[in-house]
């Protein structure tokens, strides 16, 4: 297992900035949002990728076009030239000066600076890996995906040395299979609706720790009706107490916390003495 997560810091619990740090006039999934997240203390940048109609890789969460572009379009059906002409909107639905960044731009900007977690790459893994190799940035890349047989086979064939984390929803459905493949399986993202879910039980956490696996917890709240961490979220951390959210995740063995509130989460970890 080749784990380079601590290549740029020695934090006991690392912070993954969900699409960077965005708000007001700063759109998410942009170089600007990623830069702000790093200044706020993040060591991992989580981002969403897609491929244009003519094959170029860009950074954007497809399906969110009406909310981030104020247009009812499908970016995957547009050419790279058309995508470059678009401008993202702010929280008041006014156009900003920010466009949609290419994957090449993001790689070059963050080369030698942090770990990049690439999400939503199931349909373009081969293209993504080729670009990463061209930039010579393999050690900075963390791949994370649902452990479908199709995706695992692709990872094994074209990216066996890349850090990889399967996403386990409620229970571990793939460890045995992944461990028997030529995949750099460094850990997993654990998603659980309740504290009774199998992946959050002490026995399972201890088992993963004994194997040397890194555990990724998700404090982000996409939808209050669909809990990702049994309610131990950014919201409860900010509104009530960080001990109920970020602190709970730390105390239950998570090595990485994904958050939309990078600075506040990092400050809590430092104030508590977990990180320097």
Image: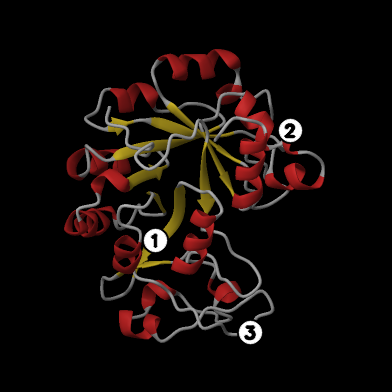
Quick one: label 3 or label 2, which is nearer the N terminus?
3
Classify residue 68 as left or right of residue 100. right
Q: Is residue 149 visible?
A: no
Residue positioned 28% across, 71% down in the render: 56
Q: Residue 236 occupies which quadrant of the picture?
A: top right
Quick one: label 3 or label 1, which is nearer the N terminus?
1
Gap between marks 3 and 2 measured at Cα:
37 Å
Q: Which is more foreground, mark 3 or mark 2?
A: 2
Q: Residue 84 occupies which quadrant of the picture?
A: bottom left
Gap between marks 3 and 1 measured at Cα:
24 Å
Q: Which mark is residue 94?
A: 3
| Crowd band around label 3 with a 10 angstrom C-alpha radius: few (<14), some (14–19), many (20+) | few
**202 or 120: nearer the eye?**
202
* Residue at image mark 2: 243
Q: Check the image and report above or below for 219 versus 1.
A: below
Q: Check the image and report above or below for 141 versus 253.
A: below
Q: Which mark is residue 39?
A: none
* Residue at image mark 1: 49
Secondary element type, mark 3: loop
Q: Outermost residue toward the front?
A: 276
**Quadrant in which the N terminus appears:** top left
């Amino acid at each position: 297992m080749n784990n380079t997560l601590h290549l740029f810091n020695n934090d006991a619990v690392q912070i993954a900035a969900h699409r960077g740090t965005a708000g007001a006039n700063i759109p998410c999934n942009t170089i600007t949002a990623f830069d702000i997240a790093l200044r706020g203390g993040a060591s991992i940048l989580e981002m969403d990728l897609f491929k244009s109609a003519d094959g170029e890789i860009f950074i954007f969460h497809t399906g969110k076009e009406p909310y981030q572009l104020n247009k009812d379009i499908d970016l995957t059906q547009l050419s790279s030239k058309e995508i470059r002409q678009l401008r993202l909107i702010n929280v008041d639905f006014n156009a900003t000066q920010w466009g949609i960044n290419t994957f090449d731009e993001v790689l070059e900007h963050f080369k030698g600076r942090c770990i990049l977690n690439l999400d939503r790459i199931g349909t373009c893994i081969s293209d993504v890996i080729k670009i990463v190799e061209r930039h010579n940035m393999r050690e900075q890349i963390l791949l994370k995906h649902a452990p479908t047989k199709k995706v695992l086979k692709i990872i094994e064939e074209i990216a066996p040395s890349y850090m990889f984390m399967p996403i386990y929803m409620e229970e571990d459905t793939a460890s045995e299979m992944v461990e028997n493949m030529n995949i750099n399986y460094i850990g997993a993202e654990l998603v659980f609706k309740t504290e009774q879910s199998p992946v959050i039980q002490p026995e399972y956490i201890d088992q993963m720790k004994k194997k040397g696996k890194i555990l990724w917890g998700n404090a982000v709240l996409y939808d209050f009706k669909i809990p990702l961490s049994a309610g131990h979220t950014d919201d409860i951390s900010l509104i009530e107490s960080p001990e109920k959210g970020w602190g709970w995740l730390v105390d239950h063995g998570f090595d990485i916390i994904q958050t939309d509130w990078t600075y506040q989460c990092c400050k809590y970890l430092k104030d508590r003495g977990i990180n320097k």
